[in-house]
Image: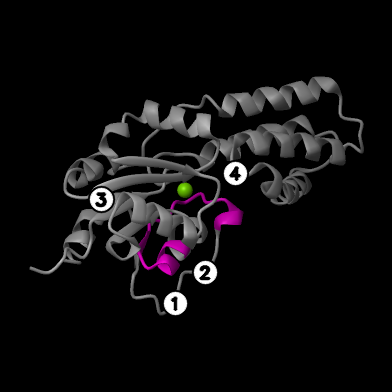
Amino acid sequence: MTARPLTTIGFDADDTLWQNEHYYRLTEEHFSSLLADFADGAKISERLLEAEKRNLAHYGFGIKGFTLSMIETAIEITEGKVPSSVISKILDTGRDLLSHPVETLPHVRETLETLAGKYLLVLITKGDLFDQERKLAQSGLGDFFDAVEIVSDKTAVTYRRIFSKVGDGPERAMMVGNSLKSDIVPAIAAGSYGVFVPHELTWVLERVEEPKDAPRFRKIDHLGELHGLIDGLH
Ligand SMILES: [Mg+2]
């Protein structure tokens, strides 16, 4: 009997299983409105993105780092004149982001239901630990997963480690997600399948070109197409 070509499936969480970027965009709009007297929206967005990029190395991904980046941007844009009442509102808007409702994306639940038990399912996400744990609990999807890995970054090394620990190695694993940069390109580099499920809102720092000449790269329109794709591999 030949070994099963696929035993383990990794799922990204934010904007793959549930909405995320949408709430960041709303927060950024609110942040921008707080500084409307000092600069226009485009300028504020540009400076905020620069701050986020700088700060990734210090704080990693997630809401806490994003909140600190907003404060830093407010200080810069106002040349140090930002009133403490505005800083307070920025802190509030960051905290609101930590309690947004968890809205699962179409086809997620039935897809996980179909695959659970047949494959080892692993949730692999980066971001704030508390926030990701909260979202997983509120999503009601936790029981479908055999393992949950909340990591500081997603590289080929990350996927090799997780798929060797949870499954039978990266060659018999697949990663499914909305970020080419974090979910797909490094998983393929690790030797796994990478299934790209684009989301209409994807953070600019997560965007890269689709991999070329990668036989293990796949793209689907929504998670409802995943089961058929997997059947085609056997
Ligand atoms: Mg994502």
10 Å neighbourhood of mark 2: few (<14), some, or many (≥20)?
Answer: few
Mark 2, secondary structure of its residue? loop
> Residue 95, relative to residue 40: is it above or below?
above
Number of labelled discs?
Answer: 4
Amino acid type at circle 3 is Gly
> Residue 160, relative to residue 33: is it above or below?
below
Which residues fall within the magenta stretch? Answer: 186-206
Depth check, mark 3 against mark 1: the one in front is 1
Whether label 2 touches label 1, CB < 8 Å:
yes
Kindly tell me whether residue 1 is visible in this rendering.
yes
User: What residue lies at 85% left-to-right and 36% top-to-bottom?
Assistant: 75
Q: Which mark is residue 61?
A: 4
For disc 3, the marked residue is 224
For disc 2, the marked residue is 209
Mark 4, secondary structure of its residue? loop
Whether label 4 touches label 1, CB < 8 Å:
no
Depth check, mark 4 against mark 3: the one in front is 4
Whether label 2 touches label 3, CB < 8 Å:
no
Q: State the CA–CA distance, disc 4 to disc 2.
A: 21 Å
Q: Earlier in the sequence, mark 4 or mark 2?
A: 4
Q: State the CA–CA distance, disc 3 to disc 1.
A: 25 Å
Q: Nearer the viewer, residue 9 or 72?
A: 9
Residue 25: x %, y % from top left: 59, 40
User: What residue lies at 34% left-to-right and 75% top-to-bottom?
Assistant: 215
User: What residue lies at 50% left-to-right and 27% top-to-bottom?
Assistant: 100
Whether label 4 touches label 3, CB < 8 Å:
no
Q: Nearer the viewer, residue 199 or 132?
A: 132
Amino acid type at circle 1 is Lys
